[in-house]
């Protein structure tokens, strides 16, 4: 059984069909890429998985369980974490405090225990700090724990978002353009981090325009254009797929043409 199954998803925004009968399955342990030109519907697909949008039709199954109708925080607690295309950190908080926000979704002490500072709550908080520091180390930000998140470089803010998502202890990590705004060196480091996330047994689903990252990091790809799936396969198959090449070269966006395989 696949870890994630999208079955015939449709999402309309008024008269616009942003996602049009999209189906695909992600196997546990894979690094899976969702690619396509600007405006193809990729982020909308992610928002349908994470409960930020409700589909007009179709199902999302995670570990065989339907996610439809569940709130985003419930979906996180089931083991689906994400980062965003536009960085969404608590800007005035430190890197450590941002990652702790991820840890809190696994904590069981309620607000009364937190107010009373019970021994259980204190132990749980201490463990959360250790976990958060370990995740910061994992993405190479161990030295930046006390740094305010908006003082970090853009590339490091993206890594901090990954650390925060990892702190929720996900089975599936969804990354929306993780290399956006990164230079070549930062992108290479990110490719290595994605490989280490996979080595931890975490399945990765990512959207990315940087084709060098997609080709190096992903084992399988789905391509969408105008909301519809136009291809699915191994990176080397996708590279030479006529429909995919046309979809990318057919765009007016210069950047898209440059990044094309
Ligand atoms: N909340 C919304 N309301 C109305 N239209 C939307 C909304 N979200 C997305 N869209 C539209 O749906 C289409 C798909 O958008 P989406 O952001 O999913 O594309 P994308 O493939 O992620 O694009 P990009 O690569 O540029 O991020 C676009 O035409 C977009 O304008």
Image (cartoon, grey):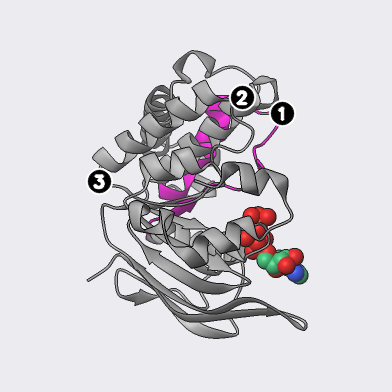
- Disc number for residue 201: 3
Q: Is residue 232 shown above or below 77? A: below
Is residue 103 highlighted in magenta?
yes
Secondary element type, mark 2: loop
The picture places residue 188, in percent across and down from the top left corner, at: 44, 27
Q: Quadrant of ligand 1?
A: bottom right
Residue 124 seen: yes
The picture places residue 34, in percent across and down from the top left corner, at: 48, 58
Are the two marked residues, 3 and 2, in contact with CB atoms closer than 8 angstroms? no
Q: CA distance from mark 1 to mark 3?
A: 33 Å
Question: Mark 2 = which residue?
Answer: 94
Q: For marks 3 and 2, give the one nearer the viewer.
A: 3
Residue 51 seen: no
Question: Mark 1 = which residue?
Answer: 92
Q: Earlier in the sequence, mark 3 or mark 2?
A: 2
In the visual, does 149 lie left or right of 130? right
Q: Earlier in the sequence, mark 1 or mark 3?
A: 1
Q: On the image, which quarter does residue 122 sit in?
A: top left
The residue segment tinted magenta is 79-106
Secondary element type, mark 1: loop
Q: Is residue 184 shown above or below 11? A: above
Is residue 258 highlighted in magenta?
no
Quadrant holding the N terminus: bottom left
Q: Is residue 17 shown above or below 41? A: below
């Amino acid at each position: 059984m696949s870890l994630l199954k999208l079955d015939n998803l449709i999402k309309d925004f008024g008269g616009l069909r942003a996602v049009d009968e999209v189906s695909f399955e992600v196997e546990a342990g894979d690094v899976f890429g969702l690619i396509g030109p600007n405006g193809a519907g990729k982020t909308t697909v992610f928002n349908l998985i994470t409960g930020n949008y409700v589909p007009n039709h179709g199902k999302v199954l995670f570990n065989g369980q339907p996610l439809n109708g569940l709130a985003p925080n419930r979906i996180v607690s089931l083991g689906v974490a994400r980062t965003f295309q536009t960085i969404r950190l608590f800007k005035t908080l430190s890197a450590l405090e941002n990652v702790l926000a991820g840890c809190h979704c696994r904590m069981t002490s309620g607000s009364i225990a937190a107010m009373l500072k019970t021994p259980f709550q204190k132990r749980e908080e201490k463990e959360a700090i250790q976990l958060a520091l370990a995740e910061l180390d994992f993405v190479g930000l161990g030295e930046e724990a006390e740094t305010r998140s908006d003082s970090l470089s853009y590339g490091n803010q993206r890594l901090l978002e990954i650390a925060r998502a990892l702190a929720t202890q996900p089975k599936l990590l969804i990354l929306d353009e993780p290399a956006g705004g990164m230079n070549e060196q930062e992108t290479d480091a990110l490719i290595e981090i994605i490989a280490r996330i996979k080595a931890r047994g975490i399945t990765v689903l990512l959207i990315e325009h940087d084709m060098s990252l997609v080709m190096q990091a992903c084992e399988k790809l789905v391509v969408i254009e105008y909301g519809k799936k136009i291809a699915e396969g191994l990176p080397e198959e996708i590279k030479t797929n006529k429909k995919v090449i046309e979809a990318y070269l057919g765009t007016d966006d210069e950047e898209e043409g440059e990044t094309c395989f």
